[in-house]
Amino acid sequence: MTHKSGFVSIVGRPNVGKSTLMNALVGEKLSIITPKPQTTRHRIIGIVNEDDYQIVFSDTPGIIEDPGYKLQELMNSFVESALEDSDLLLFMTQPNEVYAEDAPIIEQLKKVEIPKFLIVNKIDKSHQAQVQALIDLWQSRVKFDEALAVSALHAANTTALIQLILKYLPEGPPYYPKDQLTDRPERFFVAEIIREKIFEQFQQEIPYSTEVHVESFKETETKSGEPLIRIHAFIYVERESQKAIMLGHQGKSIKQLGAAARKALEQWLETKVFLDLHLKVREKWRKDEQQLKRFGYK
């Protein structure tokens, strides 16, 4: 029996549905999802395994056309590396999304030599003629090997997408053990889940000014002998005023955040969680290359 394997990167603008698509393809929630743009900051791998193939999907941050911080420049660099070191590329767009004829991504896509697919998302909210018009427009700009309309939210056409990918994937051994879903440790996803709840609870600049670092993650037991995971995490902000907003009156906001994050973590880890959150100020951390490295942006 032949075996196929390869790396497939998903690229596109913020909020186009890249993370939702990867979660649907992998069958697990690996990338956090919120209605706010630029939720995804890292390149996150999700692995689909069957007896005769292994597809390593890579969810990338949304393309930021005018980055204003070193953080955003690094996020764009993750997209650029995805264009260079994959076996297949999925470029994702949606109806009503407008790109200028001279948008940099168009030239980047033209230079990509690996197979590339055009993926039009959110067909559940679009008319067929609208979707076809968008496909025709993009095919006139870039020569895609395949074009497919999907609904990432409802996992519509995801099976067809897997089959299309397998047509182009090279033969080869698996890159990861067959029971592995991602290359990221548990601590990374704990921090991401806490950050997701920050995006859901807070508005304006607060979510974009925060970073979460998990200080400790210990598996222990309750007094009655039930499994318990103790998590201590720091939430970094850029200004004292942001810290005050996140703390809230008499600590109400941070307690609300902790309760929501603990509930989500217990669901994800499938065990009881003790979560201890603390706020710290790191001025201009989004512009500080050394601080970004400490936070894992490399």
Image (cartoon, grey):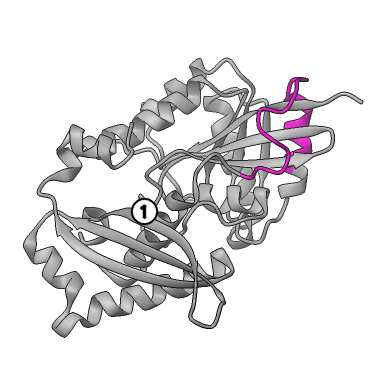
Q: Position of residue 156 (x, y in %)?
A: 71, 55
**Marker count (numbered):** 1
The residue furthest right is 1
Dividing the picture into quadrants, the one containing residue 286 is top left
- Considering depth in this image, is 178 or 171 the residue closer to the camera? 178
Range of magenta residues: 161-181
Membership of 167 in magenta stretch: yes
When the figure is inspected, residue 230 is found, relative to residue 185, above or below; the finding is below
Task: Please identify the dominant SS of the magenta region.
Answer: loop
User: Given the image, on which type of amino acid does mark 1 rest?
Assistant: Pro
Q: Nearer the viewer, residue 55 or 100?
A: 55
Residue 116 image offset from top left, x and y in percent: 61, 27
Q: Which residue is the site of mark 1? A: 37
Q: Residues within 10 Å of mark 1 (few under 14, many from 20)?
A: some
Identify the residue at image location x=31%, y=79%.
256
Say whether residue 94 is visible.
no
Q: Which quarter of the picture shows residue 10?
A: top right
- Residue located at (56% from left, 77% from top): 225
Q: Picture coordinates of residue 47 (x, y %)?
A: 65, 41
In the visual, does 233 lie left or right of 34?
A: left
Quadrant of the image containing the C terminus: top left
Question: Residue 24, how many percent across, how many down?
Answer: 64, 53
Please, which residue is most extreme toward the left here?
A: 240
